[in-house]
């Protein structure tokens, strides 16, 4: 799969506009795997990626990956900022703070996802940048110098995506997560339909900051255990905090992984609000379909699956192919809630 932003990020290195010596220490924030990384061959590269599918792809390609940026100053820092403004600014600030005096910072974003803003923000931090545009993306870069870096702005922006209390203190969240400062309406709709009769061992696929899992534990006293599966470690860490009231009372386990690669089981029930976007804006129905198949495989015979999704997403055929009984419980506000039961014989 092509990755225009990654390709464009490496363009200044490939053309010589940015010169990084062989063996140089390079930090790559929100790194993604791709052929363009050949431009970093021979360098001491540390990839920072907290999103499990991208982490897995980097590790398969042989790169060193960390969930968070390690301490230290590097010859160069690269970053593919995310779309959320506060998180993106924090990532740019982290890149600048991670580069040594005289080091280079390079960032890139698609034109439709804030490229002009990224250019302005990095320029504000560094006191000026150069740029190149290609593949409908913009790569910008500049040198870190004490006399030009806006230090107060740097410190302010580094804290922009820090965890904070939301919803009158009920949950801990942070910018950049899905629906980070609210309960999204799909999850809220599903939460109202979760029965208090659930029992045994359950799982939440795509747990986010823990809203659905906490709803299950609050509503269903016979639930003995919950596993929280989440691809984004920044969310999973907060989910575990948001469910801390149940520690020692119910068995809980947070699993940082790509759900579509499989889950442990068997479970008595599973709840899920699957993601249907990954790094871009286009619908990714294959992700939700993967969640459905994995849920079916992870349930015991007779186990229940509660799913919420945007009304237009075509999940019914996949559900019917792997579950014996599929019932729509709600169709409201552009969302649908479906209950599916695995056959006693195992289908």
Image (tube, rainbow, N blue to C red):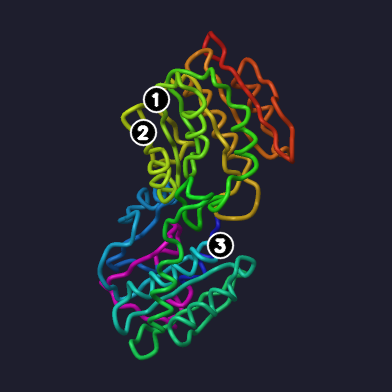
Dividing the image into 4 quarters, which one contains the C terminus?
top right
* Mark seen at residue 83: 3
As helix, strand or loop, the secondary structure at mark 1 comes to: strand
**Relative vertical location of residue 143 with respect to residue 23 in this rendering, above or below:** below
- The span picked out in magenta is 11-38
Foreground residue, 315 or 175? 175
The residue lying toward the viewer, choosing from 17 and 193, is: 193
Residue 266: x, y in percent? 43, 20
- Outermost residue, top side: 345
* Measured Cα–Cα span from mark 3 to mark 1: 35 Å
Q: In which quarter of the image is residue 36?
A: bottom left
The percent position of residue 243, horizontal first and vertical second, equals 41, 38
User: What residue is drawn where x is 58% and y is 26%?
Assistant: 194
Residue at x 62%, y 33% (from the top left corner): 190
* In this view, 23 is above or below 254: below
Measured from the top left, where is residue 162 in percent x and y? Answer: 42, 60
Q: Nearer the viewer, mark 2 or mark 3?
A: 2
- Does the segment drawn in magenta span residue 25? yes
Q: Identify the disc placed on residue 334.
A: none
Q: Position of residue 307 (x, y in %)?
A: 60, 30
Q: Which residue matches tag 1?
A: 225
Q: Which residue is drawn at 30% across and 76% down?
A: 75
Q: Does the magenta stretch include residue 95?
A: no
Using the image, determine if residue 142 lies above or below residue 293. below
Q: Check if mark 1's residue and mark 2's residue have beta carbons within 8 Å.
A: yes
Mark 3 or 1, nearer chain start: 3
Query: Is label 2 in contact with label 3 (beta carbons under 8 Å)?
Result: no
Q: Which mark is residue 253?
A: 2
């Amino acid at each position: 799969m092509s990755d225009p932003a990654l390709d464009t990020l490496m363009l200044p290195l490939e053309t010589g506009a940015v010169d990084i010596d062989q063996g140089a220490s390079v930090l790559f924030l929100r790194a993604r795997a791709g052929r363009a990384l050949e431009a970093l061959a021979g360098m001491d590269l540390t990839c920072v990626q907290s999103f499990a599918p991208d982490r897995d792809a980097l590790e398969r390609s042989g790169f060193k990956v960390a969930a968070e940026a390690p301490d230290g100053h590097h010859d160069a820092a690269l970053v593919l900022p995310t779309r959320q403004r506060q998180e993106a600014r924090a990532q740019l600030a982290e890149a600048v703070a991670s580069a040594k005096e005289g080091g280079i910072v390079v960032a890139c974003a698609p034109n439709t996802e804030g490229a002009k803003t990224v250019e302005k923000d990095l320029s504000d931090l560094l006191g000026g940048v150069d740029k190149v545009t290609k593949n409908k993306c913009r790569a910008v870069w500049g040198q870190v110098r004490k006399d030009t870096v806006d230090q107060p702005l740097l410190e302010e922006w580094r804290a922009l995506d820090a965890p904070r209390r939301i919803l009158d203190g009920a949950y801990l969240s942070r910018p950049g997560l899905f629906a980070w400062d609210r309960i999204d309406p799909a999850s809220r709709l599903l939460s109202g339909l979760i029965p208090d009769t659930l029992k045994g061992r359950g799982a939440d696929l795509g747990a986010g900051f823990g809203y659905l899992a906490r709803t299950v534990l609050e509503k269903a006293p016979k639930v003995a255990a919950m596993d929280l599966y989440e691809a984004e470690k920044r969310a999973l860490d907060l989910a575990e905090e948001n469910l801390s009231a149940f520690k020692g009372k119910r068995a809980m386990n947070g699993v940082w992984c790509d759900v579509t690669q499989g889950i442990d089981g068997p479970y008595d029930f599973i709840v899920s609000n699957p993601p249907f976007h990954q790094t871009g804006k286009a619908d990714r129905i294959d992700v939700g379909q993967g969640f459905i198949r994995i849920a079916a495989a992870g349930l015991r015979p007779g186990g229940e699956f509660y799913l919420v999704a945007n009304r237009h997403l075509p999940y019914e055929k996949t559900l019917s192919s792997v579950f014996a009984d599929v019932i729509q419980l709600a169709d409201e506000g552009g969302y649908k809630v479906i209950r599916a039961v695995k056959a006693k014989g195992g289908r």
